[in-house]
Image: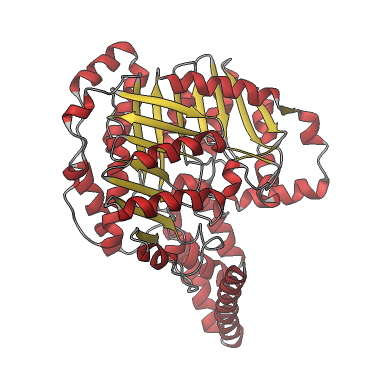
Amino acid sequence: MKKVVMIVCLILLQFAWMATVLFKFSYTYTYVNYGIRFIAVCVVIYIINQWNNPSSKLSWTFLILLSPVMGLLLYLTFGRKSITKRTRQKMDGYIRQALKHTNQTPEINQFLEEQDKEVYRQTKYINDWSGYPVYQNTETKYYKCGEDMFPDMLVELEKAKHFIFLEYFIVKEGYMFNQILTVLERKAKAGVDVRLIYDDVGSIATLPDHYYDILKAKGIKCAAFNPFRPILSVLMNNRDHRKIMVVDGIVGFTGGINLSDEYINQVERYGYWKDTGVRLKGEGVWSLTLMFLSMWDCMSDRKEDYEQFRVHKEQKNKWVSDGFVQPYCDCPLDAEYVCETVYLNIINQAMEYLYIFTPYLIIDNEILTALCNTAKRGVDVRIVTPGVPDKRMIFWLTQSYYQPLIESGVKIYQYRPGFLHAKSFLCDDKIATVGSVNLDYRSLYLHFECGVYMYQTKAVLELKQDCLEVFASSDEITMEFCEKQNVFVRLFQGVMRLFAPLC
């Protein structure tokens, strides 16, 4: 925690120094003041002409015109989604290299097109714009909480013979990670290729400095994604929010569960910690393997033979076919918002019901309108958010979206036992997605994310059963709740809504 405080103080000091210098010059010299205002107008024109989310444009425009000095400083630091052209081209190259090793089976496409055109169009979109195909020959298992998934993770890690890949936003020393680390260290000594990626900002308060060196000394290959430095930089915006574990290319886990004790309720934070995850066994794991390898190679600046990590054909004969699965990911370095489009397509395709778990409900006009319209045409739309927040201001911001949704017929629930961290969509007993993607601006536009789209798998109905149990243990929010909120809270919510894309 001391490290976090120190870094925050250094950043604030930089802001204060730059703002003081600019304010001083702008008020001392009239031409400097006019110059800054001219630059502010030019930046606003630039922002308006970008292919970005309209809500984000409005927020930055208001802030920059309200206070040109602070607005420009904040925008230059946090507002620009794009990193340097060289870095973007480098990462794009590694992603394209990985996608050369994917191939959509024509027979699956043909079957889906004949079976369900809406599902076919969704899978085609994901394949065309994320690059990852839809698979059969993959068995799914859904987990309604971290403490159910953790034992299976350990079991699969113990089976590893060739490689173990882990990519997580948060890694924290404690009961959960120490047990995993014991297995990783033992497997590394036995010659298994063990690699771990953790996000440096996500783990800034949970791991010591240069923790990757500690793991390397244990024989574990490790890298911190986008190492954080207390220097104002646009690079702080783009974080690796994925949760991926792959063992031998045969088994893969993903979802919302990080490697920290609260995710398996070994420690209590904000009441009971409710999360979800999914395990894949079979062909679909290849996409998770490639997602990890493209990120790893980009960070290590090397190109390796991906085919050495592909499972042999003899193993494929043992796999069970369980519907259709399509792991997908999103990169913030292009203008294609894959995760948001996947969510929007599910919302618009729903005919009977749509159930959503999300820890944060900070949505743009497109998603808000889609949810309202889906409810208005008679679909049973239900959204579950936390009953106990992890961030009070973000919780108030989430609640500010309740009223228009409820007015349109959407049912909103707050999870009574504690904090709901799950990111899951379920639709009409046939479609579901489980992954790392929150319904907020950072997940949808700024972070590296992943998820699994599923059609007619066992996990779909397992998620439905979990949804019904969660509804029973949650409080439904009414219009009376919205209207009786404290006037100061409602005023604060109004202001926060304006700056929601910046949160």
The N terminus lies in which quarter of the figure? bottom right
User: Residue at point 41% right, 49% down?
Assistant: 183
For the point 49% across and 61% down, the residue is 201
Give the number of marks. 0
In this rendered view, identify the residue nearer to me: 492 or 192: 192
Would residue 447 be visible to someone looking at this image? no
Colour scheme shown: secondary structure
Percent of width and height locating residue 133: 27, 31
174 shown above or below 234: above
Image quadrant where residue 123 sits: top left
- Is any part of residue 444 visible from this angle? yes
The vertical placement of 142 against 206, above or below, is above
- For image coordinates 46% across by 59% down, the residue present is 237
**Position above or below: 167 against 246:** below
Residue 11 appears at what percent x and percent y? 56, 73
Q: Going 57% across and 37% down the picture, which residue do you hit?
A: 358
